[in-house]
């Protein structure tokens, strides 16, 4: 079951909130749903290099509030806020709503966001970088930033091969059946000259203990996770740093303090 269901939809109402926060009667529901899809499609195409992770849409008392979670807020805001004002006017025409408000929220650690990680790998693949190298670099960066586990699956004509195949790389743990595990998921495409390559990214951020605020505009606090903020230096756990033998081998001298060899002549 866990391999088939979307990890985000599987956790809605448990540790994750909805990206569309509004209530409507049966007559307006379909209209609002189509409008949400148009807004997200438009913004993703309009800000394709803005590092957009998710778009949260709220409707309250005739007011449309759109919150854009991005790793590059400067690109969306523009010089003096001119770009965000232009996007606001374009959304007013798209939705025929005079009262549109846009909020920008910055993602502090984009290395732990599945959507941004997937788009970064996709852009590298489109730039003719080896898919294995791009995926390994993304996995190493995510683990260094404190992820408990990460899994990336690439499918398509990998490396320009004639026959499509799938390859999966992972590190750490990503328990999809455990609902209290905070797992971020994204499905991204890379458009290459030899076809479309699909990328699936799962990132496990830790275990959520206790009740979490389900509002997606409130960033998940470190108090909910076990152990709080994790240390970024997870690479070498030995007390001697780069010296694999500790202090018993005399620094870089692998033989320690050996007696000089005597000449037998």
Image: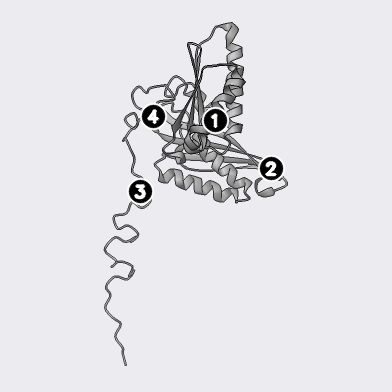
Q: CA distance from mark 4 to mark 3?
A: 22 Å
Residue 249 visible? The answer is yes
For disc 4, the marked residue is: 220
Q: Residues within 10 Å of mark 3 (few under 14, many from 20)?
A: few
Would you say the residues marked 4 and 2 are in contact, meaning their CB atoms lie under 8 Å apart? no
For disc 2, the marked residue is: 164
Question: Which structural element holds mark 4?
Answer: loop
Q: Residue furthest right?
A: 162
Q: CA distance from mark 3 to mark 1?
A: 31 Å
Residue 175 rendering spot, x and y as whole percentages? 45, 33
Closest to the observer: 181 or 248?
Answer: 181
Q: Nearer the viewer, mark 3 or mark 2?
A: 3
Q: CA distance from mark 4 to mark 2?
A: 38 Å
**Image check: 167 left or right of 74?**
right
Identify the residue at image location x=44%, y=34%. 106
Identify the residue at image location x=50%, y=45%. 138
Q: Nearer the viewer, mark 4 or mark 3?
A: 4
Q: Residues within 10 Å of mark 4 (few under 14, many from 20)?
A: some
Q: Nearer the viewer, mark 1 or mark 2?
A: 2
Sequence-first tag of 4 and 1: 1
Sequence-first tag of 4 and 2: 2
Sequence-first tag of 3 and 2: 2
Residue 141 rendering spot, x and y as whole percentages? 45, 46
Q: Nearer the viewer, mark 3 or mark 1?
A: 3
Residue 145 rendering spot, x and y as whole percentages? 40, 43
For disc 1, the marked residue is: 3
Identify the residue at image location x=39%, y=41%. 146
């Amino acid at each position: 079951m866990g391999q088939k269901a979307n990890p985000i939809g599987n956790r809605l109402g448990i540790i994750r909130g909805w990206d569309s926060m509004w209530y409507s009667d049966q007559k307006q529901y379909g209209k609002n749903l189509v409008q949400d899809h148009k807004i997200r499609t438009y913004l993703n195409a309009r800000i394709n290099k803005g590092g957009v992770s998710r778009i949260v849409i709220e409707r309250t008392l005739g007011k449309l509030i759109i919150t854009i979670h991005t790793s590059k807020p400067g690109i969306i805001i523009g010089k003096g806020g001119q770009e965000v004002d232009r996007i606001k006017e374009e959304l007013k025409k798209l939705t025929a709503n005079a009262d549109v408000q846009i909020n920008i929220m910055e993602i502090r650690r984009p290395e732990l966001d599945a959507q941004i990680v997937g788009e970064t790998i996709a852009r590298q693949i489109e730039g003719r970088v080896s898919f294995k190298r791009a995926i390994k670099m993304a996995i190493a960066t995510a683990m260094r930033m404190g992820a408990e586990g990460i899994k990336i699956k690439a499918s398509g004509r990998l490396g320009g091969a004639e026959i499509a195949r799938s390859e999966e790389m992972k590190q750490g743990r990503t328990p999809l059946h455990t609902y209290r595990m905070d797992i971020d998921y994204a499905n991204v495409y890379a458009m290459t000259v030899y076809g479309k390559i699909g990328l699936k990214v799962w990132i496990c951020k830790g275990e959520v203990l206790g009740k979490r605020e389900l509002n997606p505009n409130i960033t998940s606090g470190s108090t909910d996770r076990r152990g709080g903020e994790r240390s970024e230096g997870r690479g070498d756990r030995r007390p001697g740093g780069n010296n694999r033998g500790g202090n018993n081998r005399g620094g870089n001298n692998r033989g320690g303090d050996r007696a000089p060899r005597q000449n037998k002549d």
